[in-house]
Amino acid sequence: MKTFCGRANPTTGSMEWLEEGEDYDYHQEIARSRYADMLHDKDRNVKYYQGIRAAVSRVKERGEKAIVLDIGTGTGLLSMMAASAGADFCYAIEVFKPMANAAVKIVEKNGFSDKIKVINKHSTEVTVGPDGDMQCRANILVTELFDTELIGEGALPTYEHAHKYLVQEGCEAVPHRATVYVQLVESKRMWSWKKLFPVHVEAEDGEKIIVPPSEMENCPGVPSVCDIQLNQMPSSDFTALSDVVTMFSVDFSKPVQSASTYYRVQLEPVKSGKAQIVLSWWDIDMDPSGMINCTMAPYWVKPTSALQWRDHWMQCVYFLPNEEPVLQGEKLYLTACRDEYSVWYNLQKAREGENKAGEEEHKADVRVESPVCRCRAHLLWNRPRFGELNDQNRTRQYIRSLRKVLKTDSVCLCISDGSLLPVLAHYLGAKQVQCMQPSRIDLYHPHELWQAFFKANHLEDKIKIIEARPELLKPSHLEDKKISVLVGEPFFTTSLLPWHNLYFWYARTAVSTHLASNVTVLPQSASLHMMIVEFQDLWRIRSPCGICEGFDVQTMDEMIKDSLNFRESKEAEPHPLWEYPCKSLSDPKEVLTFDFTKAVPQHCLSTQGSVNLLRKGRSHGAVLWMEYHLAADISVSTGLMQMSNEKGNCEWNPHCKQAVYFFSSVIESEILSDPTAVTYAINFDTKTGEIAMDFKL
């Protein structure tokens, strides 16, 4: 069987479907999986073990045999916990074949083959009976089917089916229940991930304000959850308008309903403000009494307890359909609607003198259909892109640069996806402005969004959208004029790694014949930068686990390692480092430059050298990012914004993912008597637009 994988092609700005061997998909799944992160989650593992021991004891005390069903077993860890806690037999279900094979090996290596049967099926296909996969129904149900949103991985339909067909009535469940908590907040920062704010431009003829079209203003956005490491969100970036309240809970020991439904709570704001965001997280009780609890609560909720870092379960940010002004002490109803896989929220004000009957009336108002983006912007731009477009400091840098290069007779072409640059260029005096949005996302018709955008700002006859690829640009598109100013942010929706936006250089090369001899290109150049870092926690996602709660899981470590080495060269991977603190062990270093004033060369660009480690620490890997040099003294960075203090703490661009290259072996530089250096070789292949790198310690 062949697998087709979508990859961004930085030379064309398009997503392309490449045919890979049948193993590729498995390897990607394993290499980029969160298995290592879960095995390193000490809090989760200890609590599961406690909950499983308690459940086995309760069954034994009733004089019954303990028969365990473990759905989504992964490494087989929870089944081995049950077997060592005295369970008589365990059925461990795992649908992902390479994982099921690994579980068989791990179970065997730990000596539990006689007590644990691994079944490589989806749980809904498992049969029970003398000739079935399971001899009889189980009386203990153990699962770990949760994501940050709790239900996004299909936990509800899986539980619903298991209770109907695979477990006994009145079974024990680990976890026993899950509870979802919410808090209403105001946050300009988080709200800027959903709404486009007006942009103020000082033009020759007074101040201009760029506004979003009304359909974008009133759009509820997309229902997909925004999951982030809320523990990295400083308290100065949001204001709590309510206390933390319980939204709903699910008891896993009883039959579970997955059909769409809603839950409602009454809230009284503790502060007046603009209700914009619902922050949410959950906890799980491993036992009926709630004594064994595992929580995802962020730092301000339980400031005394030590926080367990984890990346497989984070916290959720939900955007209300519209901003609601609320007053301290007034009565509000917050409604959570859900289907099988996702949750969304609505806020309503209680009506005067409302009682229970009034609440019944409110129920009629609840619409359980999930929100749909009608303005297209939320389909085209992800949340960090909204944040980037709303970043006034960044916009100011582009305005300053455009001021320097635009003249009253400038013929300007902008090549970037969904950019404000054409509007800025028009307001700053360019005679003629055209724009191209080359990333092919034909599904969402970006041109229609931009027509609405120009119309909202009365610019429909001032800015022309060229619906052609750069290589198909004709003189007639430009009214037979030559381009005197070529601009780009550059930003393209298909880019995954920082250097994929170098597509701008390829597009610039494709339109070479249309450029005036004295053309100004903005940015004039770009550079690739790198720094060696020690991560506070992110290293765990690629770190071998070895022994987990007394069980040998090295088979899993080897499997992850093989998958990471499946491609001859290891690859960098994108991570938003504002969520993952690290300290720099070296100075940042510029390693490659790209000159946009010239066409892309035929030959590769390569560099090698070494970088000295300046402070004690563990070298987990290198971080790479791009900087764009807009004009003589104006640059924008997609990575490091500033390094603070001698400790090497870093501030990263919050709107971009940086590239992280994890070293295969970590070096500890505890003593700095002999300066340790890291040597690197970096190669930019101009044929493919990809960067290959190698580091030696």
Image: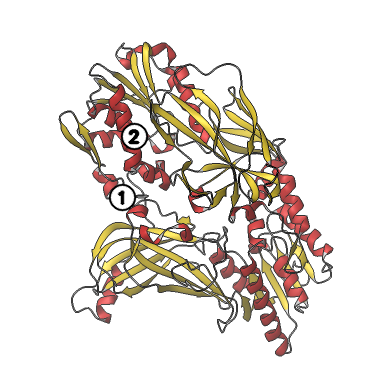
Q: Secondary structure at mark 1?
A: loop
What residue lies at 36% left-to-right and 57% top-to-bottom?
Answer: 237
Q: Quadrant of residue 158?
A: bottom right
Number of numbered tags placed on the structure image: 2
Is residue 69 in view from this perspective? yes
Look at the picture and state if 18 lies above or below 348.
Answer: above
Residue at 74% in and 51% down: 559
Q: Is residue 37 left or right of residue 303?
A: right
Which sits earlier in the primary sequence, circle 2 or circle 1? Answer: 1
Mark linked to residue 422? none
Q: Secondary structure at mark 2?
A: helix
Give the camera-side residue of 116 and 261.
116
Q: Which part of the image, by quadrant, shows the C terminus?
A: top right
For marks 2 and 1, give the one nearer the viewer. 2
Taking the view exactly as shown, the residue that stands out farthest to the bottom is 62
Q: Neighbour class for label 1 at 10 Å: few (<14), some, many (≥20)?
A: many
At label 2, which amino acid type do we have? Gln
- Residue type at mark 1: give it: Cys
Question: Where in the figure is residue 242, as x and y percent of width and height?
Answer: 33, 70
- Nearest the viewer among 473 and 674 is 674
Q: Give the residue pinned by disc 1.
A: 219
- Residue 134 is left or right of residue 463, and the answer is right
